Image: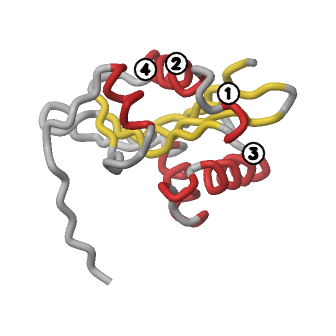
Amino acid sequence: MKFKYYSSVEILTTIEKQKIVNFLYEHLDEFGDSKDSIGKAIDYAMLTYPLAGGFILIAEEKGEILGTVVMNHTGMKGYIPENILVYIAVHKDYRGKGLGKKLMNEALLYAKGDIALHVEPDNPAKFLYEKIGFDSKYLEMRLKRS
């Protein structure tokens, strides 16, 4: 298994982006978003603006994606964590084998500054995040406008 790292200085082809979108859409299960939303998070990670950007990390073997992370910069250093972990997913056939932890640890090497993430209370990944050191300091509230 090897890791591939993409940021605004690397070129992510349309085919590679679609492969990542499809992987996340399939393997995020009930905790995922639409393909359009996933694509927007990937596009944001590839931006080169000073207060935007981020990175994508892929674990793959023989050209097959086994897991991926999408991290976006918030541009709000000092009062909001500098990074938000938007997506992390592990292929269904590789779950429970430590790949999620390896992906997280590798992503932590690339992320500069603090990291926030959103996780649903019943998501099994919540335990991984807590083991790595994330805590639930705040309750998130949202006002959704149509």
CA gap between label 2 and label 1 equals 10 Å
The residue positioned 49% from the left and 44% from the top of the image is: 87
Q: How many marks?
A: 4
Amino acid on which the number 2 mark rests in the picture = Glu
Q: Nearer the viewer, mark 3 or mark 1?
A: 1
Within 10 Å of disc 4 (Cα), the crowding (few <14, some 14-19, many 20+) is: some
Among the two numbered marks 4 and 3 on one chain, the one whose residue lies closer to the N terminus: 3
Q: Label 4 to label 2, Cα distance in Å? A: 5 Å
Whether pointer 4 and pointer 2 mark residues with C-beta atoms closer than 8 Å, the reply is yes
- In three-dimensional space, the C-alpha distance between marks 1 and 4, rounded to whole angstroms, equals 14 Å
Q: Which residue is mark 4?
A: 108
Look at mark 3 in the image and give the residue it sits on: 16
Q: Position of residue 7 (x, y in %)?
A: 56, 33
> Could you tell me how far apart the alpha carbons at marks 4 and 3 are, in whole angstroms?
23 Å
* The N terminus: image quadrant: top right
Residue 84 is situated, as x and y percent measured from the top left of the image, at: 35, 40
- Kindly identify which numbered label has been placed on residue 59: 1
Tag in front: 4 or 3:
4
Q: Position of residue 126 (x, y in %)?
A: 37, 37
Cβ atoms at labels 2 and 1 below 8 Å apart = yes
Task: Give whichever of discs 3 and 2 has the lower sequence position.
Answer: 3
Q: Which residue occupies 22% across, 30% down?
A: 135
Residue at mark 2:
106
Q: Is residue 27 left or right of residue 54?
A: right
Mark 1 or mark 4, earlier in chain: 1
Q: Disc 1 vs disc 4: Cβ atoms closer than 8 Å? A: no
